[in-house]
């Protein structure tokens, strides 16, 4: 309690914490696994699908100015910490991917809604495209811990871009696809996901926008009465993270919805692409 | 939320509408800027919003607006471009929810209004006049005037004054007119709105800007152009506050790129009686609350007993009502 009071006094908000980089591990392609310390209160109340807005610049610098959103790849109790999967892409992510253990980071969160596992769902199908795999790894951990069945489909440009199978915990069926055919199915992950749609009680997906467009066709041809439901995590550039600026909206049948508070997880059938 | 009280002893209070019987009393000079703080409730669980001097709502329009297509935000060097397109529930949707909510809050809530016709500004102001929980109206004149071929109200002194007069005619609420930095002569706009009945002036709104995606050979924003905010615009904002604060006698509220106490002090010394923080809140949500304590401590250390003592200290012509003094130097001594 004292610690938290002190935080409010120094940062002016209870939602931000100063974190220390604990480990950097190389994983898939040029992406890294960045493990950072986090208060126990943060780790305990966290749900899969939620994200954190990370400051991607040195203290005192204003460039790049805006925080970058990162989904949680895995949360740990001992020591209390979070792992993010960071692919160096533009300026902010490249800065973040270049951090080394011992360095400090300013992190805001947890933010956003989360994936929901419906009460009667036993068979969960996950579809990951590239670094979109991050929130699904945490979801898969949760599902396995609850004794649910998981089929995990992942697509990447090549074998190096795939999540190593050893990263998935427990009895998970892992199916892969690569654009160049260097491992698994030669082609898109959405081309093989159709085989599992009838089996699944619930589908979860996270990947780039083009993946969702092909998923639309798969979902339309393989589902009956929009069953099973599909939950997707949508990527938008963000400014505030609290629903105040409306810079991160997703167009849905209910209107323009702030993806930082009423997302990033959306019902696929509600989203207008 | 824990209420951490200021440590210093200096008096931070300011009245932004000293000539209006309804007053606009702020406990401290730190406000949250329009469009960057939603309707206050978005930040209620994030910072102790009741400690703020005041906050300004997202711009409200006569009708509900869905806003622009995405992308609406692009990061630029030490700043950002936004083209949100005034997504808001419209004045009718707004009054159903927020006045009663705000009435239960201690922090003064200011409504920012935007319209494309003078009558619409007046219609909204008249509706707001009857509502509880509203401390003041901030008129956003950075909007196209439909009856003048879409020319921005805020770029023209007479058009800005016309809006101000129309609003003044229907409400006794304190009125803050928020100037557009796109005006070719911002001082004459300031003088015109003061004469038209504004209680205070705020500035600056965003500067119109643009960024292009070289790969796609298209503008990055779906709206093509947007407003530039953040540290990149601060020197422009400080200069304009300095100019306007020497030309008018009503309080001036400064904003543009404030990220630290030093930034806020620049505005105060230039003549701002309060500041608003916008983009800085996105980057650092705790900033406005921290600044209250930091200012209080700084005033103590520097030997000031009241915040009002530092307003305009760096401005030779502060509230002289003589715009020429500064204009001459601006033109001749760059
Ligand atoms: C909820 C959420 C969770 C995320 N989780 C992860 C994660 O786990 N791992 C991960 O590696 N990344 C994740 N991201 C994406 C990560 O935040 C991006 O890498 C980042 O926003 C882009 O920043 P940058 O500094 O790399 O690129 P910038 O320097 O900002 O941009 C480089 C270029 O890419 C363009 N660009 C920027 N953002 C986007 C975008 N969203 N879509 C298309 N073009 C864009 C820019 O216009 C620019 O031209 C997530 C994003 C969201 C919204
Ligand atoms: C995302 C965003 C939305 C904004 N919306 C409004 C608005 O609705 N009405 C208005 O008067 N100003 C609006 N502004 C302008 C700000 O209130 C402020 O004048 C400007 O951003 C400069 O301050 P800053 O650099 O601290 O952000 C907006 C700014 C941003 C960044
Ligand atoms: S990032 Fe501001 S509303 Fe979502």
Image (tube, coloured by chain):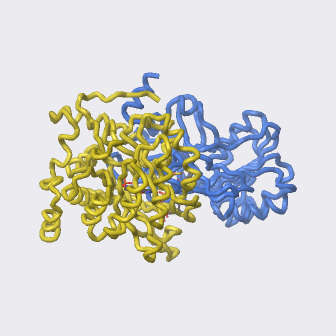
Chain colours: A blue, B yellow
Q: Quadrant of residue A148?
A: top right
**Horizontal side, residue B234 vs residue B81: left or right:** left
Instruction: Look at the picture and state if A155 lies above or below A7.
Output: below
Residue A76 x, y percent position in the rendering: 58, 33
Please give the count of numbered marks on the rendered protein: 0
Extreme front residue here? B169
**Horizontal side, residue B237 vs residue A217: left or right:** left
Q: Nearer the viewer, residue A22 or A57?
A: A57
Q: Nearer the viewer, residue A130 or B334?
A: B334
Q: Quadrant of residue B296?
A: top left
Residue B59 x, y percent position in the rendering: 47, 55
Quarter that holds the C terminus of chain B: bottom left
Residue A248 x, y percent position in the rendering: 55, 55
Q: Nearer the viewer, residue A174 or B38?
A: B38
**Horizontal side, residue B16 vs residue B60: left or right:** left
Residue at 42 percent of width and 51 percent of height: B171
Instruction: Look at the picture and state if A124 lies above or below B151.
Output: above
Extreme top residue here? A2
> From this viewpoint, is residue A96 visible?
no
Residue at 81 percent of width and 62 percent of height: A220
Instruction: Look at the picture and state if B152 lies above or below B253.
Output: below
Residue at 37 percent of width and 37 percent of height: B289
Residue B281 x, y percent position in the rendering: 41, 47
> From this viewpoint, is residue B323 visible?
yes
């Amino acid at each position: 309690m004292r610690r938290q009071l002190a935080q409010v006094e120094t940062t002016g908000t209870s939602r931000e914490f100063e974190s220390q980089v604990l480990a950097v591990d190389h994983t898939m392609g040029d992406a890294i696994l960045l493990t950072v310390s986090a208060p126990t209160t943060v780790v305990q109340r966290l749900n899969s699908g939620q994200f954190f807005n990370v400051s991607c610049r040195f203290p005192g610098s204003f460039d790049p100015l805006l925080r970058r959103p990162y989904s949680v790849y895995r949360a740990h109790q001992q020591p209390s910490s979070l792992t993010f999967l960071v692919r160096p892409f533009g300026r902010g992510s490249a800065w973040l991917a270049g951090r080394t253990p011992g360095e400090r980071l300013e992190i805001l969160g947890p933010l956003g809604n989360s994936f929901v596992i419906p009460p009667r769902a036993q068979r969960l199908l996950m579809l990951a495209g590239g670094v979109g795999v991050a929130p699904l790894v945490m979801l898969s951990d949760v599902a396995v811990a609850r004794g649910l069945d998981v089929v995990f489909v992942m697509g990447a440009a090549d074998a190096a871009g795939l999540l190593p199978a050893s990263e998935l915990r427990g009895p998970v069926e892992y199916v892969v696809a690569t654009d160049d055919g260097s491992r698994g199915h030669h082609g898109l992950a959405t081309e093989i996901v159709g085989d599992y749609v009838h089996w699944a009680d619930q589908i979860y997906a996270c990947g780039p926008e083009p993946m969702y467009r092909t998923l639309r066709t798969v979902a339309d041809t393989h589902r009956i009465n929009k069953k099973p439901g599909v939950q997707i995590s949508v990527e938008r550039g963000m400014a505030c993270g609290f629903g105040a600026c409306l810079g991160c909206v997703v167009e849905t049948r209910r209107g323009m919805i702030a993806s930082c508070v009423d997302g990033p997880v959306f019902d696929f059938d509600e989203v207008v692409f | 939320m824990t209420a951490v009280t200021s440590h210093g002893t200096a008096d931070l209070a300011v009245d932004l509408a000293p000539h209006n019987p309804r007053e606009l009393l702020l406990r401290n000079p730190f406000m949250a800027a329009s469009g960057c703080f939603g309707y206050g409730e978005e930040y209620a669980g994030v910072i102790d919003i009741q400690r703020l001097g005041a906050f300004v709502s997202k711009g409200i329009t006569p009708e509900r607006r869905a806003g622009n297509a995405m992308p609406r935000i692009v990061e630029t060097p030490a700043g950002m471009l936004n083209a949100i397109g005034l997504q808001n529930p419209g004045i009718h949707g707004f009054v159903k929810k927020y006045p009663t909510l705000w009435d239960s809050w201690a922090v003064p809530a200011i409504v920012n209004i935007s319209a494309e016709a003078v009558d619409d500004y007046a219609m909204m102001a008249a509706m707001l006049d009857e509502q509880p929980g509203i401390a003041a109206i901030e008129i956003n004149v950075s909007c196209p005037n439909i009856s003048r071929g879409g020319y921005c109200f805020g770029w023209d002194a007479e058009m800005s004054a016309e809006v101000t007069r129309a609003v003044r005619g229907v409400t006794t609420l304190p009125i803050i007119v928020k100037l557009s930095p796109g005006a070719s002569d911002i001082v004459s706009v300031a003088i015109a709105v003061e004469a038209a009945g504004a209680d205070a002036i705020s500035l600056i709104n965003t500067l119109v800007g643009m960024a292009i995606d070289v790969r796609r050979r298209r503008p990055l924003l779906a709206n093509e152009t947007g407003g530039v905010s953040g540290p990149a615009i601060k020197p422009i904002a400080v200069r304009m506050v300095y100019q306007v604060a020497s030309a008018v006698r009503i309080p001036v509220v400064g904003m543009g790129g404030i990220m630290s106490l030093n930034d806020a002090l620049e505005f105060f010394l230039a003549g701002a009686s309060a500041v608003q923080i916008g983009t800085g809140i996105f980057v650092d949500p705790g900033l406005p609350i921290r600044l209250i304590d930091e200012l209080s401590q700084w005033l103590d250390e520097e030997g000031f007993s009241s915040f009002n003592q530092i307003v305009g200290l760096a401005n030779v012509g502060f509230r002289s009502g003589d715009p020429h003094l500064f204009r001459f130097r601006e033109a001749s001594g760059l």
